[in-house]
């Protein structure tokens, strides 16, 4: 009887286990194995284990510190502003107003587009010579000559982050709006009776109530943004001179230019390790333990 | 009667099964997939199938980004594949796997062999001096220019030298009016653009290696390379939009079409796009300007079809490749796709290829004194690392983050470590 029950459990779990194994676990293990090999398209027939050579090459690359710094800047700036603006938008959207659903559709649509397409689109919009943004600024008389948003190393990182912020706001807005709508109005009414103003209501009711959602969304978004080369790849491919190069773009460039799948996998494993450490620290600090999505 | 119909049906089954057993299906994979390209290849396949009953060709068209990966995986596991498209930059990698058939015996017996344009088969012998593919189109950079824009500034002559080009570019550059001269390429494999300018300062480039002089020395350690690179940087600083450090092919074409930069170095496939975007005669081509070394050093870029070494239908595969390269099909293919034909007869027979659009290439091909074709070290394993390194270091120089001397030193070090200097 008991063995039948075990068999039943196994049978029911098998599809999930199978899908996770083939789509998640196998590629991860394969990626880790690749990072210790010399798998490039040039020596397809001579693949062998080469120890830590790939890791040494990647970590001692003189460009690596700046790539790491760019990655940090990319994640921190993107997440903070996406969250703040998304949160603000969610609060505004919570109140019913005429045409809210149309407005919501317009606000949320960037999230439905492909990141790479957005990157390409913005690379044209921000083009120094024939970009529409420069054209508008010139016509308004705000500038004398086109701004080189993507070719000036000082502006390039700033430009790609702005686009990423624009792209990611809807995610926070959608998630936080759903959480906000679950807060019972009675809590706010009671607080109002006690004389609480909007700021106090935000600090003592809204934020604590939606804290799990905030923690989850920030955690998820940080992970996604770190693994998200699409926008930068479409806009600058990490240039000029590596000024917008982040780990995820570096990984793609290694495959695109060098066809070196092992070194790209090494960068992938480094990203995975950083994210694991980040997740552990983040969850410890926020003391939320296991997160529910 | 019953007996007769029984015998007849048995006979019919026998004939049908015999015929179907005779049918041969070839599998063919393309690399540079695009909707237009796929359509043209399918049309040529259809014609071939009509002329060769019993032969079917299945075309596999993976997206370009993953095409080579797919080919490598397919051939390394001997999956059914007969005809493979290979580009010059990947030929060595595929040939070194031992999965491509040596096409020399086929080429030597082919009636096409007397009509190949000069040097093209030699250019295809990248790996072990053996042709593992038959090129079907050639890509050589030339100078595209916009007479309509230049005439506004009173420029009616075509720059014959790099110095003249620089002078014209400087003359018309006026950032306030969004007018520049040189259509610069900063990203997405700018290697060929840098090299065309730098090597034009030399008169002794090795015909077999763009990065060596005839006496076997690295060009990057030669003072002329410094002069050439300085000149190239000047193009960027004085005659090109600053934004062009972030320009790839699309931006270059866009700026040329908009007239912002009326001088462009590009390959013949640009003509296909320009013919769509600009009216007939609005743009022209001219030979590449020669440099202070008195020469210019273009390279043959090409793509073509190869046969897998394990194919069971090599002869039929070759028959198709020959068919694809016949003057009629080669002309059609190159006209539609925007490339230079590999068959000399096409230039003579087809008025399109002797039209003014192709003047730049025709003059270069007919002037071996000034235009010496050379080759990239594509068989060197470091080649795949070179393009990104070259692009990034070049961008640093353009942004003033690295000096010209430092860049040349780095490039020399790179190729020395790669064993280019013997």
Image: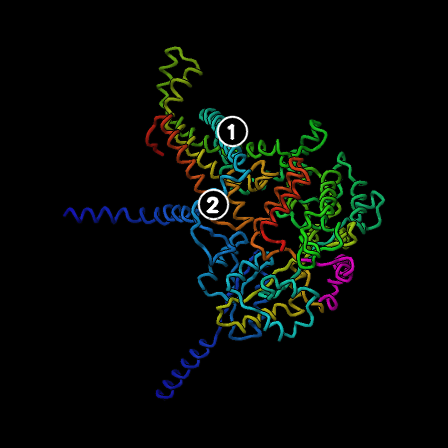
Q: Chain of mark 1?
A: A
B263 lies above or below A244: below
| Residue depicted at x 34% and y 26% | A287
- What's the magenta bit mostly, secondary-structure-wise? helix
Can residue B367 be found in the magenta stretch? yes
Which mark is in front, 2 or 1? Answer: 2
Q: Is residue A194 visible?
A: yes
| Residue depicted at x 49% and y 69% | B311
| Residue depicted at x 75% and y 64% | B351
Question: Mark 1: which secondary structure?
Answer: helix
A45 lies above or below B5: above
Image: magenta residue range: B346-374
Question: On the picture, is A40 further left or further right than A192?
Answer: right
Residue A36 pos. (x, y %) = 43, 47
Q: Chain of mark 2?
A: A
* Crowd class of label 2 (few under 14; some 14 to 19; many from 20; radius 10 Å): many
Marks 2 and 1: same chain?
Answer: yes
Question: Mark 2: which secondary structure?
Answer: helix
**Which residue is the site of mark 2?**
A54
Q: Which of the two labelled residues, at mark 2 and mark 1, occupies the earlier sequence position?
A: 2
Residue A146 pos. (x, y %) = 69, 33
Residue B248 pos. (x, y %) = 64, 45
| Residue depicted at x 27% and y 46% | A13
Residue A77, disc: 1
Can residue B17 be found in the magenta stretch? no
* Crowd class of label 1 (few under 14; some 14 to 19; many from 20; radius 10 Å): some
Image marks 2 and 1: residues in contact by CB distance under 8 Å: no
Residue B372 pos. (x, y %) = 73, 58
Of residues A113 and A71, which is closer to you in this image?
A71
């Amino acid at each position: 009887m008991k063995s039948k029950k075990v068999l039943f459990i196994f049978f029911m779990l098998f599809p999930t286990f199978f899908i996770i194994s083939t789509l998640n676990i196998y590629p991860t293990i394969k990626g880790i194995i690749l990072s210790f090999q010399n798998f490039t398209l040039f020596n397809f027939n001579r693949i062998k284990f080469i120890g830590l050579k790939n890791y040494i090459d990647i970590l001692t690359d003189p460009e690596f510190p700046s790539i790491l710094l760019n990655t940090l800047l990319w994640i921190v700036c993107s997440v903070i502003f996406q969250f703040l603006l998304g949160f603000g938008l969610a609060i505004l959207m919570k109140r019913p107003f005429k045409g809210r659903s149309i407005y919501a559709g317009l606000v949320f649509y960037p999230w439905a587009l492909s990141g790479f397409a957005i990157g390409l689109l913005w690379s044209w919009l921000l083009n120094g010579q024939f970009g529409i943004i420069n054209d508008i600024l010139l016509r308004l008389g705000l500038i004398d000559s086109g701004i080189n948003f993507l070719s000036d190393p000082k502006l390039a990182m700033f430009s790609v982050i702005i686009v990423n912020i624009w792209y990611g706001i809807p995610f926070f807005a959608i998630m936080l709006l759903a959480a906000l709508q679950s807060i019972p109005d009675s809590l706010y009414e009671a607080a109002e009776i006690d004389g609480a103003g909007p700021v106090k209501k935000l600090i003592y009711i809204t934020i604590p109530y939606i804290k799990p959602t905030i923690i989850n969304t920030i955690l998820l978004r940080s992970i996604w943004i770190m693994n998200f080369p699409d926008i930068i790849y479409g806009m600058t491919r990490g240039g000029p001179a590596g000024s917008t190069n982040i780990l995820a773009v570096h990984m793609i460039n290694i495959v695109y230019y060098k066809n070196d799948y092992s070194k790209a996998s090494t960068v992938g494993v480094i990203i995975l390790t950083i994210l694991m450490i980040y997740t552990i620290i983040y969850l410890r600090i926020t003391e939320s333990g296991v997160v529910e999505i | 009667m019953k007996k007769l119909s029984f015998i007849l049906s048995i006979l019919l089954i026998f004939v049908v099964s015999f015929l179907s057993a005779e049918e041969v299906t070839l599998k063919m994979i393309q690399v540079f997939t695009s909707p237009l390209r796929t359509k043209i290849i399918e049309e040529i396949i259809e014609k071939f199938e009509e002329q060769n009953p019993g032969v079917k060709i299945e075309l596999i068209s993976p997206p370009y980004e993953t095409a080579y990966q797919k080919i490598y995986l397919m051939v390394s596991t001997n999956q059914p594949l007969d005809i493979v498209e290979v580009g010059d930059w990947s030929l060595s990698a595929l040939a070194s796997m031992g999965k491509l058939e040596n096409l020399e015996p086929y080429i030597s017996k082919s009636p096409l062999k007397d009509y190949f344009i000069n040097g093209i088969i030699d250019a295809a012998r990248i790996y072990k001096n053996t042709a593992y593919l038959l090129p079907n189109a050639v890509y050589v950079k030339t100078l595209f220019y916009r007479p309509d824009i230049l005439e506004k500034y009173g420029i009616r002559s075509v720059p014959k030298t790099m110095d003249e080009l620089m002078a014209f570019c400087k003359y018309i550059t006026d950032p306030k009016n969004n007018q520049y001269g040189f259509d610069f390429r900063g990203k997405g494999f700018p290697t060929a653009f840098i090299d065309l300018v730098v090597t034009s300062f030399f008169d002794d480039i090795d015909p077999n290696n763009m990065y060596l002089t005839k006496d076997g020395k690295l060009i990057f350690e030669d003072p002329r390379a410094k002069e050439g690179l300085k000149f190239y940087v000047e193009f960027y600083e004085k005659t090109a939009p600053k934004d062009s450090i972030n320009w790839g092919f699309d931006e270059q074409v866009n700026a040329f079409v908009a007239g912002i930069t009326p001088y462009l170095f590009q390959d013949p496939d640009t003509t296909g796009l320009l013919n769509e975007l600009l009216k007939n005669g609005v743009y022209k081509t001219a030979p590449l300007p020669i440099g202070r070394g008195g020469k210019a050093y273009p390279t043959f870029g090409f793509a073509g079809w190869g046969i897998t070494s394990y194919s069971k239908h090599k002869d039929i595969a070759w028959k198709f490749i020959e068919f694809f390269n016949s003057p009629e099909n080669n002309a059609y293919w190159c006209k539609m796709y925007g490339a230079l034909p590999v068959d000399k007869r096409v230039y003579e027979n087809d008025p399109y290829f002797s039209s003014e659009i192709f003047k730049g290439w025709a003059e270069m091909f007919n002037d071996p004194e000034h235009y010496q074709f050379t080759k990239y070290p594509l068989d060197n394993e470091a080649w795949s690392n070179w393009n990104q390194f070259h692009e990034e270091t070049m961008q640093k120089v353009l942004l003033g983050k690295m000096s010209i001397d430092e860049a040349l030193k780095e490039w020399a070090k790179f190729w020395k470590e790669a064993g280019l200097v013997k």
